[in-house]
């Protein structure tokens, strides 16, 4: 390969002066797989990459996902020659378009012209709330949006006033705050879609390295469920969580200690991932021999229907005054006691389970006791 060229998946590209993180390859791999599923489900794949950078995502959607058309837009006009050089590889396979306009203007124009896309990818820096409603306006019904936020301090509850102003959400800090970040993004998409007369269904949600990425489909409003949108309460005393509907906010107290809960929301409380969608992605990953993606997608499948929070092993050990057992052993023990439980991709030292924290502590103590007897 010539100097200055990189290889990722089935494509070669140059980075030049564009921002590019090799460590984010998994995010791009998941997008490529989900886009391939999108094409299988709907029979078409018109892609709008709103913040294309060097164009690697646009190129991969065209080459690997089987896109019928790709529009690569980058707000920095100085990157136009780089985009042109990289996307030249698509010239003999599919039609494509390159532009260097403000991303919000592009999305607004698509909506006003009724130029709708099967996939709208918005991969920006910091807070992407201003782009969310515009991205939905550019998405066809049954199409998908793939959005990013790197505004972790706000999403995890460290800047509550800022979140209230930008998202209309109260975000508070607690042990499962990184999952909260994904759910706030999904909740914002849900709220905006509802205002348009539609609903959303997450395909998958992914937190990695301070980046929050969610893939969601635009669906008819009749298929949306009101119970998927609400508030999450956390008790700093006993460490337990509760989900809350708006009618319960006036009496949001801990059932164990009677103290007021720390409440965040509104946010998405439904599944983080669509199991059917994720399994379709996993089947493609297996065909392509993408083992790392396959393992991650298996974890998505396991955690998909779990409650909208997790318990850290550290919290279980601290409250039980014990050496925490291996996560896999604790999950097996929870299953043996009739609880649902899984690992979570969000935190390698945490579990998602239908059991209470108190039950997790008691089961962990029993595990430790059995090891001591042996």
Image: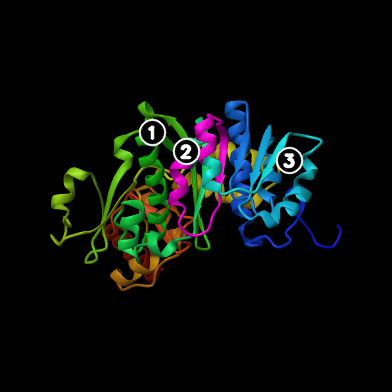
Q: Nearer the viewer, residue 42 or 76?
A: 76
| Residue at far right of view | 2
Q: Nearer the viewer, mark 2 or mark 3?
A: 2
Q: Nearer the viewer, residue 56 or 33?
A: 56
Can you give x and y, in whole percent of width and height, for residue 140 in the image? 52, 30
- Going 67% across and 38% down the picture, which residue do you hit? 70
Distance Cα–Cα, label 2 vs label 3: 25 Å
* Residue 146 falls inside the magenta stretch: no
Q: Where the N terminus falls, by quadrant?
A: bottom right
Circle nearer the N terminus (2, 1): 2
- Going 60% across and 35% down the picture, which residue do you hit? 37
Mark carried by residue 63: 3
Answer whether labels 2 and 3 touch (C-beta < 8 Å).
Answer: no
The reply to whether residue 120 is in sight is yes
Q: Which residue is mark 1?
A: 196
Can you give x and y, in whole percent of width and height, for residue 280 in the image? 58, 36
Can you give x and y, in whole percent of width and height, for residue 206 in the image? 50, 52
Mark carried by residue 136: 2
Circle nearer the N terminus (1, 3): 3
Q: Residue 87 occupies which quadrant of the picture?
A: top right
Answer whether labels 2 and 1 touch (C-beta < 8 Å).
Answer: yes
* Residue 109 falls inside the magenta stretch: yes
Q: Where the C terminus falls, by quadrant?
A: bottom left
Q: SS for tag 3?
A: helix
Distance Cα–Cα, label 2 vs label 1: 9 Å
Can you give x and y, in whole percent of width and height, for residue 91 in the image? 79, 38
Residue bounds of the magenta highlight: 108-134
């Amino acid at each position: 390969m010539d100097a200055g060229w990189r290889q990722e998946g089935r494509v070669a590209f140059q980075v030049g002066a564009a921002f590019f993180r090799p460590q984010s390859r998994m995010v791009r791999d998941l997008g490529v797989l989900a886009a391939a599923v999108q094409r299988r489900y709907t029979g078409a794949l018109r892609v709008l990459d709103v913040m294309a950078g060097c164009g690697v995502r646009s190129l991969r959607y065209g080459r690997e996902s089987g896109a019928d058309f790709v529009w690569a837009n980058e707000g920095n006009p100085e990157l136009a020659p780089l985009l042109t050089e990289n996307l030249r590889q698509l010239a003999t396979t599919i039609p494509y378009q390159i532009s260097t306009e403000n991303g919000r203007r592009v999305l607004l124009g698509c909506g006003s012209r009724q130029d709708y896309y099967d996939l709208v990818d918005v991969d920006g820096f910091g807070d992407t709330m201003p782009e969310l409603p515009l991205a939905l306006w550019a998405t066809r019904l049954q199409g998908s949006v793939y959005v990013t936020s790197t505004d972790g301090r706000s999403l995890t509850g460290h800047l509550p006033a800022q979140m209230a102003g930008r998202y209309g959400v109260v975000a508070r800090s607690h042990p499962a705050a990184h999952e909260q970040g994904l759910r706030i993004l999904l909740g914002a998409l849900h709220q905006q879609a509802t205002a348009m007369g539609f609903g959303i269904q997450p395909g998958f949600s992914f937190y990695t390295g301070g980046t929050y990425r969610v893939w969601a489909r635009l669906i008819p409003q009749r298929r949306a469920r009101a119970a998927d949108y609400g508030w999450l309460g956390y008790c700093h005393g006993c460490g337990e969580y509760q989900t809350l509907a708006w009618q319960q906010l006036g009496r949001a107290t801990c059932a164990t200690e009677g103290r007021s809960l720390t409440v965040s929301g509104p946010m998405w409380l439904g599944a983080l991932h669509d199991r059917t969608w994720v399994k379709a992605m996993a089947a493609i990953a297996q065909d392509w021999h993408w083992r790392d993606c396959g393992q991650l997608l298996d974890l998505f499948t396991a955690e998909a229907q779990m409650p909208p929070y997790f318990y850290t092993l550290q919290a279980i050990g601290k409250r039980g005054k014990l050496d925490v057992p291996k996560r896999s052993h604790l999950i097996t023990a929870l299953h043996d006691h009739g609880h649902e439980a899984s690992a979570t991709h969000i935190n390698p030292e945490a579990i998602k389970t239908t059991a209470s924290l108190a039950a997790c502590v008691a089961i962990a103590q029993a595990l430790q006791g059995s090891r001591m007897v042996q």
